[in-house]
Amino acid sequence: MTAAARADTSPGMIEPSSDCPQCPRLVAFRDEWRAREPLWHNAPVPSFGDMGARLLVVGLAPGLRGANRTGRPFTGDYAGDLLYETLSDFGFSSGVFAARPDDGLQLKGALLTNAVRCVPPENKPTAPEIKTCRSYLAATIASLPELRAILALGRIAHESTVRALGASPGKVPFAHQAAHDIGRVRLFDSYHCSRYNTNTGRLTRDMFRAVFTDMKAYLDAR
């Protein structure tokens, strides 16, 4: 990762090491891609954004040719194009997103992370991998003193976030554009902004923006 990419990530953030050994399947996949693409990031992808964030966005895991390649969440694939565009439109970023970690983009009042920090085969982490990585998600949440809202992109991100907040997913069900108060934060849900979801119409640009409209109204009222 370049110095520019690291500039917006706090050195105090609790993140897995670049050679985190905790999930053997993910380690093997990481090693395979390090051999195939030695210039890629190919390591756990750290959170990116503002440590004074009032909004935390939680995705599933790095995309193979997206964040796993670039080293910045949601950077290098379609999901990032839609997410960063929407963040900009709602005032959560400054600069121009160019799908590169050295594009100079900065987030304002927002932080991006993933429920699982390493790229999983076929973009499908296992339940033990999600559980293992949840300690980093919980630490990220705890490290944000101004946090008021969390956006979970997809059911897996939702359920891991609910557990990281000490609640039960059975009592806090996932649904697109749902909102749940858990402790000091309000958790907002959206279908993941993946190319598959947008191509199939499961998630439209207007649907995604509607979630952001709800979050922005909530944060402005606070």
Image (spheres, grey):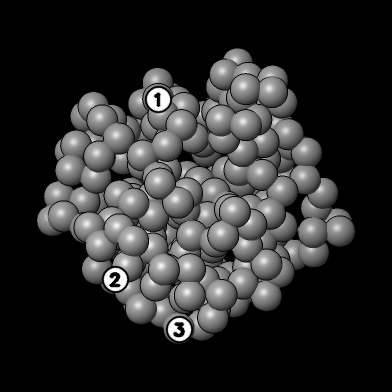
Depth check: give the residue in front, 89 or 42: 42
* Residue at the spot 48% in from the left edge and 68% down from the top edge: 29
Which of discs 2 and 1 lies nearer the camera? The answer is 1
* Residue at the spot 72% in from the left edge and 48% down from the top edge: 155
Disc 2 from disc 1: Cα separation: 28 Å
Q: Is residue 141 left or right of residue 11?
A: right
User: In the rendering, at what x and y percent does residue 93 appear?
Assistant: 31, 33
Q: Which residue corresponds to mark 1? A: 85
Q: Which residue corresponds to mark 3? A: 21
User: In the rendering, at what x and y percent does residue 18 appear?
Assistant: 33, 74
Depth check: give the residue in front, 7 or 192: 192
Q: For the view shown, which residue lies furthest in the right direction?
A: 170
Report whether residue 165 is seen. Answer: no
Question: How many other residues sit within 10 Å of disc 3, few (<14), some (14-19) or many (≥20)?
Answer: few
Find out whether the residues at labels 2 and 1 contact each other: C-beta distance under 8 Å.
Answer: no
Callout 1 secondary element: helix
Question: How many other residues sit within 10 Å of disc 1, few (<14), some (14-19) or many (≥20)?
Answer: some
Callout 3 secondary element: loop
Look at label 2 and name its amino acid. Answer: Gly
Q: For the view shown, which residue lies furthest in the left direction?
A: 3
User: In the rendering, at what x and y percent does residue 141 appear?
Assistant: 50, 62
Look at label 3 and name its amino acid. Answer: Pro
Question: How many other residues sit within 10 Å of disc 2, few (<14), some (14-19) or many (≥20)?
Answer: few
Q: Which residue corresponds to mark 2? A: 12
Q: For the view shown, which residue lies furthest in the top direction?
A: 206
User: In the rendering, at what x and y percent does residue 151 appear?
Assistant: 58, 43
Which is more N-terminal, label 1 or label 3? 3
* Residue at the spot 71% in from the left edge and 69% down from the top edge: 127
Look at label 1 and name its amino acid. Answer: Glu
Q: To which quarter of the image does residue 107 belong?
A: top left
Which label is found at residue 94? none
